[in-house]
Image (cartoon, rainbow, N blue to C red):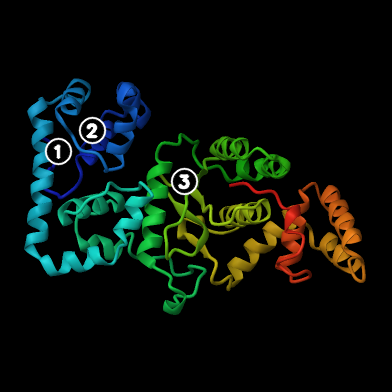
Amino acid sequence: MSNLDTDWVVHPSETVLDLLDQREESIDSFLGANIEQIEWAKAFLMGIESINESAASRLSEYLGGSESFWIKLQEDYSNKLESLIESDVKSYRQWLSQFNYNEISKKSWLPKSRKNSEKLGYLFSLFEISDLGEWDEGPGKLPEHVAFRRNKEAGHDNHALSAWIAISKKSAMFQNVNVYDHSRALELVPSLRELVLEKDTHLVLSSLKKFLACAGIRFVLQDAPAGCYVSGAVVSCDDARPLIILTTRYKTDDQFWFSFFHELGHVLLHDWREGFIDSDLSNDGALEAEANSYAQHLLVPMDQLHKLIENLRNKSAIQKVRLIMKTARSCGVTPGVVVGQLQHHKSIPFSHFNKLKNKMF
């Protein structure tokens, strides 16, 4: 155990992950060894649980080292956090104040706490940083081509966005996927497309994860916190695999599927390692237009949509519904998906035909 550097202010879980890496063991093997305490094990690896006497005993048995070593590791970490805040109270308090910690804890991403040192520790673990300098050059630095206007008047909170991305990456770490295979991803598109007609949301989500894992892509559905007006994102995981993240902000099938295939478009058409974050506030830029076009073509090709738009002219409401359903059958999608495209192209008001959409969440 002496070859591990414990001087950094990092959560003890990093020591565990380092040891697993040295021993060439997977996270699954660690979870399996803690099967009776698997929720604790997952939370610990995410940096939101600590080592108590019981955990120290399990860690000692599985990874080696004495129980006192693991207890001391936890105590040293807590003490270093206290010292870190005391070294520059103003800077750390200012940084903490930029997060709506109550909102984050309300979503059960991080534990509730009133102590600044605990909040700092949880946030440092979430973002995998050990000082504020790493924040500025890491999770606090957003991609250059983020698809939203940095508009303060719109109330967008970049710290909430960073937390949303970080917790999604933490959740994705438990998904076992193959090495990313671009050709395999392209081959899977028809199978993903067939899921559009599936009404069972649980089956849709589990099937998406299963299919995407075959091509080395992770998928997470993560609710966005207040102030984070995001619809989806593509980011790179630490093991060089793409992660598609969607929010539950939009509840209906038309918005879910367009957002999903939009993000998949970024993976298949662009350099996903650069990172793409798509917001409610803007869809500007050539790359966004390409991703939109990709999703559009997969769901309701433009020739079919233009034909429908033309046929809808001067028709009664009942006739319009019949035409929408006919187009949906022709395209192999739900009527709600067609309605969503008509609304997106401003061919019908956003208040019309929403009863044709399926609610997913």
Q: Give how far across and how far down residue 213 sits, in percent.
A: 54, 37
Q: Quadrant of residue 340?
A: bottom right
Q: Give how far across and how far down residue 119 sits, in percent.
A: 22, 54
Q: Nearer the viewer, residue 221 or 5?
A: 221
Crowding near the residue tagged with mark 1, few <14, some 14–19, many ≥20 C-alpha atoms within 10 Å: few
Q: Is residue 1 in view from this perspective?
A: no
Assess whether mark 1 and mark 2 are in contact (beta carbons under 8 angstroms): yes
Taking 204 as reference, is 248 left or right? left
Amino acid carrying mark 2 in the image: Leu
Q: Secondary structure at mark 3?
A: loop
Q: CA distance from mark 2 to mark 1?
A: 9 Å
Residue where numbered disc 1 is placed:
4
Residue where numbered disc 3 is placed:
241
The earlier-in-sequence mark between 2 and 3 is: 2
Image height of 153 relative to 183, above or below: below
Residue where numbered disc 2 is placed:
19
Amino acid carrying mark 1 in the image: Leu
The residue at 51%/44% (across/down) is 219
Q: Quadrant of residue 34?
A: top left
The earlier-in-sequence mark between 1 and 3 is: 1
Assess whether mark 3 and mark 1 are in contact (beta carbons under 8 angstroms): no
Mark identifier at residue 111: none
Q: CA distance from mark 1 to mark 3?
A: 27 Å
Taking 361 as reference, is 82 left or right? left
Q: Is residue 241 in view from this perspective?
A: yes
Q: Secondary structure at mark 1?
A: loop
Q: Quadrant of residue 2?
A: top left
Q: Secondary structure at mark 2?
A: helix
The residue at 89%/57% (across/down) is 323
Amino acid carrying mark 3 in the image: Arg
